[in-house]
Structures are given as structure tokens and as C-alpha cells.
Image (cartoon, rainbow, N blue to C red):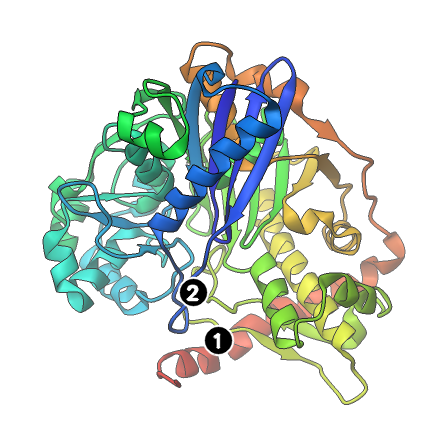
Amino acid sequence: MLLGIDIGSSAVKAALVDPDEGVLATAQAGVELFSPRAGWAEADPDQWWAAVCVLVPELLAASGREAGAIEAVAAAGMVPAVLALDAGGRPLRRAILQNDARAAAEVEQLASLLAGIDLVHLTGSALTQQSVAPTLRWLERYEPDVFAATATVTGSYDWLAARLGAEPHVERNWALESGLFGFDDAPLADVLERARIPERFLPAVRAAGTVVGTVSEQAAAESGLRAGTPIVVGGADHVSSAYGAGLLEAGDWLVKLGGAGDILAVSESRLIDERLYLDAHPAGAWLPNGCMATSGSLVRWLARVSGGAPLEQLEAEAEATPPGAGGVVCLPYFLGEKSPLHDPAQRGAFIGLHLGHERGHVYRAALEAVAYGFRHHVEVFRERGVPLSLARVTNGGSRSTLWKQILADVLGVELWPVLDHPGASLGAALAAAVGAGARGWDAIRPLVKLGDPISPRTEHSERYDELYAVYRELEPAVRPLSHRLAARDWR
């Protein structure tokens, strides 16, 4: 057996996998997303560890197996979350997550300081709110005691591996998306110098599938794992999830409806574009991709501010409204926006509302807005010649029949749901298998099950084309107003 763990913004998920038998058991435990100020997104690493200590015994009980049968463990998680650790490897504060938008001013300052350094060509990603350097600059400015006590900076899943007993490290895609390392895995000395980031903060870079230690006696006693179990480098959650959904060949692509919205495509060549992110596929190819700051998180927010209505009720109300939500268009920038805009000062909006609209129109407009955001990314992929053939859809939002149909209609392609997909925990478990020498990366093929495709309804294409054009025109129109509002603290 292999154990894969996925650290998410709302839950820690885990899967026990036998490459011959498939997924033996899955489980998850909720964790909190802290947002004490507008645009902030934080998590408590102690909650991640507590969840792991609950999930391991639960999985073993559900599978009827013993901890000694686990050949290796690997973790995936949000990227690039930032954990500032002291000399003993303990977090000095809550983790700052990848969709946190607090460092907008630091992004602007660093853009000036790093003028002349082409981060996109050095790392595959532009300087954005997701970059690690602005976050560290924010820490030095507003939490100087934390910055001064920092011995190591790492990511969510790499911290978990270290908590289990691994040597300090960061996985390759955390390194690339951090903006602090180049494609050769070496720290970018000019970036560190100009951003005033000590190189001692940065541990070694390790590739997915690499053994980095064994489970310690203490971690075993707390978690229920066997001491000495090999710990293997997992990967970024969106990469592990895409791999776990079967993305192996050029032309395979995936829409991932998680708390954020991810879209990834397999490319044999390295694609450099400042609008996108670029990650290394664990099997050796490349994954140009985009990430919208909100997707499922916008849906959950609407449910909460709608009086806590069940999602099933909201979906039924949205289903009863016509495509195009009665002319309501939403901008889903409720946490700013990541790709392809990279604008943390953008804000969410609904336009076209009148007194004849109901809650279902607003809810449907939000679902359509996320689909429009994915369509924007697809246009960028096609503009850059990325092959797009078989399209898959996964994660929590993919359980919504309505949302999948809206996506197919807006994108104009067949969407193949991945059935019973554990998400990134499956990709992490297969990375553990590679590290243990039990399998190669192609072991994922027989474990992927696709459902019946959702075909686009051509009778809705004209309406969605028109409203998508409004969506694209709306963002630059409201941008100055969003920036004015974002510049003030309105608490």
C-alpha cells in the first residue's frame, strides 16, 4: 500500500492505494481557512498535523490493513503556500496561502526593484501575488519579529513531510512558482539580493518521487504510521490532481473545480507566458496552467450570505433560470485574481441586476463566471499553440451536473468527468509508489475511470458568446474602481 495526503484550504484528504487493486480507502478532515482581513488567506499547520493523526488510523481501519503494510508516504498541497519556520522546524505563525492578496504593495515595489530580471523566462511565472518574495517582504515590514526568527521557508506539503521526519526541502514546483529558483533548481541570486531575502531561508529542491527521509519515532507515535516508513516527495496539489486524473499525453487537459479554479494542459515543450504558470509534470513533460483565485470558494460564500441555503437548493433555483442568468454577469474576483490577470486589487461584481431577478439568477451567474474565466485561459492556450484534445473535469464542483453542463456550453467542448477521483492524494500516493520503486509514472493509467461525456448544447452558444464578450469588457471597465476601493481599509 501507498499513502497519499493532500493539504487543501478547507480539508486534509488522504488515500490508501494499492496500484494493483486501486484505491482502498479515502478519508478527509476539515481545517479552517482564516481570512481576518480582506484578501487574506491563512491556515494553521497544527490543524493539518492533527488531521493527519486522525486520518491515518481511520484509513487503516477502513481498509483492514496494518501500518506496516504501507510501503511509502507522500504529500501534496497548496502551492506556493509560505511557512516561516524557526531553527527547530516549528511554524512561527499561520501559513500564508497561495491565494492570499495582502502583499499587493510589495508586488509593486518588487516589480521596480527587479526591473531587468526576466522572471517569466527564468522561472516560468511572472511576479504576482502568488510569488513568495512579496510575502516575505510583507513579513519583514509588518511582522519583523517573525522574519528575524525565520530559519527556513517552505511549503505546505514539504512542511508536512518534514513533520513526519524528512530532511528540509521544497518540491520543484513550489520552487518554480515561488519565483526564487530557476529551472536548474538553483536559487536566483540576483532576485534574493534585490528582494533582501537571505539564501539561508531556502532549503534544497527535490523532485517528485524522490525519497527524502523516513517516518520518525515521534511522528509514528502520534500519527499511527510505522517508524521507518519511507517519505517521498509528492507535489503541488493541482499537478498531483492532474496527474491523478490521467493527464499524461500532450493534448490532455483538465478543469479542476476546487476552492480555487485550476486549468492544466500537458505540453511536451516548455511554454513561457506571463499570463500563465508553468509546472513540471512529474513524468517529465510540462504543465502550463492557470489558477483563478475563487471557484468553489465563491459558491460557498454565496451559500453563506444567502442564509445558509443548501447547495442543492441553490442549484435547483439556478437550473430553473435560463442560460445567461437573465442577463446577469458576475466578475468572480472576490479574492482578487490570479491568472491570467494577476491583479490582487480586482474585486468581485455583479452587473445587470434588476428587481425581477431571484437568488437563482445570482447563483447561476457565479457558476457561469467561473466558466468564463476558464474560457479566457483556453483562449490563451490556443493562442500559444498548446494542443487541447481530451478535456477532463474533477474536484468538488464537478459533482454539480449543472456546473459541468455550463462549463461544456461556455467552453464549447466535451467534458469527461473523472469518476471516484480522490484528487491530489491519489497523485501523491503514486509518487510514493515511484519513490518506493514499486511502479513507474504510467501506473496511473488503469486507476483512472472516466464517466459519460457532457456535450455542449449548441443552442446556447450564441447567448454565451455574447455574455462572455460582456465579461471580458467588464473587467477593464471596472478595474480603476476596484483599485480605488481596494486601496482603502473599509473595515
Residue found at the very far right of the displayed protein: 459
Q: Position of residue 170 (x, y in %)?
A: 29, 35
Q: Where's residue 86, x and y in %?
A: 16, 46
Gap between marks 1 and 2, in whole Å? Answer: 9 Å
Q: On the picture, is 78 further left or further right than 308?
A: left
Residue type at mark 2: give it. Answer: Asp
What residue appears at the point 67 percent right and 67 percent down from the top-left corner? Answer: 366
Residue 286 can be seen, yes or no = no
Contact (Cβ within 8 Å) of mark 1 with mark 2: yes
Amino acid carrying label 1: it is Arg
Q: Residues within 10 Å of mark 1 (few under 14, many from 20)?
A: some
Image height check: is 339 above or below 57?
A: below
Secondary structure type for disc 2: loop
Which dot marks residue 343? 2
> From the viewer's perspective, is 119 left or right of 145?
right
Identify the mark at residue 479; answer none if there is no mark: 1
Is 334 situated left or right of 387 in this image? left
Q: Position of residue 393 (x, y in %)?
A: 68, 42
Residue 408 coordinates in the image, percent (x, y): 76, 49
Q: Can you say whether 85 is above or below 93 in the image?
A: above
Establish if 357 lies above or below 230: below
Task: Tell me which corner region of the image, top left, top right, bottom left or bottom right, holds residue 474.
Answer: bottom right
Tell how many labels. Answer: 2
Q: What's the residue at 19%, 68% (across, down)?
A: 142
